[in-house]
Image (cartoon, rainbow, N blue to C red):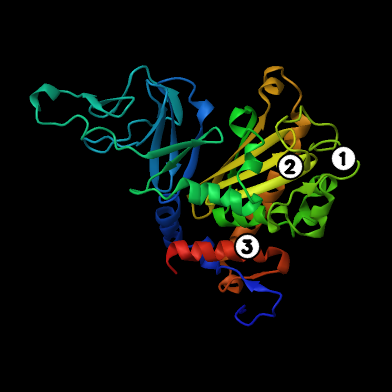
Amino acid sequence: MSTTSLPPSLMATLPGEHYTDAQVFALEQKRIFESMWFCAVRAADLPKPGAFKTVQVGSESILVTRARDNSIRAFYNVCRHRGARICTEESGEVKRAFQCPYHAWTYDLEGKLIAAPNLTKMPDLDRVEYGLVNVAVREWLGYVWVCLADEPPSFEDTVLGEVRTRLGDVASLDNYGVENLALGRRIVYDVKANWKLIVENFMECYHCATIHPELTEVLPEFADGYAAQYYVGHGALFGEDVQGFTVDGSEGLDRIPTISEDQDRRYYAITIKPQVFVNMVPDHVIIHRMFPLAVDRTVVECDWLYLPEVVAEGKDISRSVELFHRVNEQDFEACERTQPSMSSRTYAKGGVLVPSEHHIGLFHDWVRGKLGE
């Protein structure tokens, strides 16, 4: 099967090996996830100094913590002595310092080496130079973004640039005050599929009428096959009889007061490459963060964020959460159903994109560019 000679309405996809080849995945880890800004941790998950989380960013384990001055710091989770992991837990809390469990080299919350067996006999050892290796950090939307590059790309041009490309400006996202919202629910999905299949699925709605009955009831225009992301600045309008972004279209929660009238009763979605999806509706925001762990395995953490009083007062968010939870399950099942076929000889040269998916072709061009193809 060949997709080299296509009618004008179709575009070729990436070839199958891009979803199955371990060498391609290793190159993606290096040139994409270890080179770009990566959304690692929700800042509120580090409530006080000494709280930490370990996160897989590309092929590296990264230790993210809150320092004594309340700032967020990130380090490679590697002891400077013999390379042991400093923290083996996914999350936790230390009082004043991190201690390597191998030889007890000890680092303060700013990463400086402060103690080690017989350290006084090594007066020439620079405690800052041999401290933990720093990783660049930026806080935005209430999340901690890290970048492993020696010279990180401009956050404004890359991350915020994605928002401008999708919405036309950053102010439209600022209206939701995401950094001030509270976590209502977090669900973690372990998806047996390549990360690009998940991105491609999220970007298009050609599949919506087929596998998302609840979503197309709330957003009828999605049944026509064009996702909101196909048009700059467009938000999908709720159905005429729909009261809220809930699994049954019933009334939602307290509306975010700072959104514009034009944003009411609409759903917006942004893909922030390489691993974040932002979904905005009048009463909450849903953020997906992908963690590609293998060529055929991606962990997705999904946060539902509401006004603080909605969470503090224990209001019922179940119908609100259930809608996108079902969408997630439907999407991830489709991705898992697709993954095995990526190694089929019939997909060696890839498949095709229909007109409503042509913007995915731009994503494929971006991947090729990052890989140096």
CB atoms at circles 3 and 2 under 8 Å apart? Answer: no
Residue 324 or residue 262, whichever sits in front: 262
Residue 193 or residue 257, whichever sits in front: 257
Q: Nearer the viewer, mark 2 or mark 1?
A: 1
- Image quadrant holding the C terminus, namely bottom left
Q: Nearer the viewer, mark 3 or mark 2?
A: 3
Residue 305 sits above or below residue 314 on the image: below
Count the marks. 3
Q: Which residue is mark 2?
A: 326
- Residue 95: where, in percent of width, then height? 37, 17
- Residue 15: where, in percent of width, then height? 55, 69
Q: Is residue 85 left or right of residue 359?
A: left
Alpha carbons under labels 2 and 1: distance apart: 18 Å
First in sequence: mark 2 vs mark 1: 1
Residue 79 sits above or below residue 20 on the image: above
Q: Is residue 170 visible?
A: yes
- Residue 28: where, in percent of width, then height? 45, 57
At mark 2, the secondary structure is helix
Q: Which residue is mark 1?
A: 242
At mark 3, the secondary structure is helix
Tell me the residue at 86%/34% (across/down): 250
Label 2 packing within 10 angstroms: few (<14), some (14-19), many (20+): some
First in sequence: mark 1 vs mark 3: 1
Asked which quadrant contains residue 6, the reply is bottom right
Alpha carbons under labels 3 and 2: distance apart: 23 Å
Label 3 packing within 10 angstroms: few (<14), some (14-19), many (20+): many
Q: Is residue 15 left or right of residue 99?
A: right
Tell me the residue at 63%/48% (across/down): 270
- Residue 330: where, in percent of width, then height? 72, 48
Residue 119 or residue 277, whichever sits in front: 277
Q: Which residue is mark 3?
A: 360
Q: Amino acid at mark 2?
A: Arg
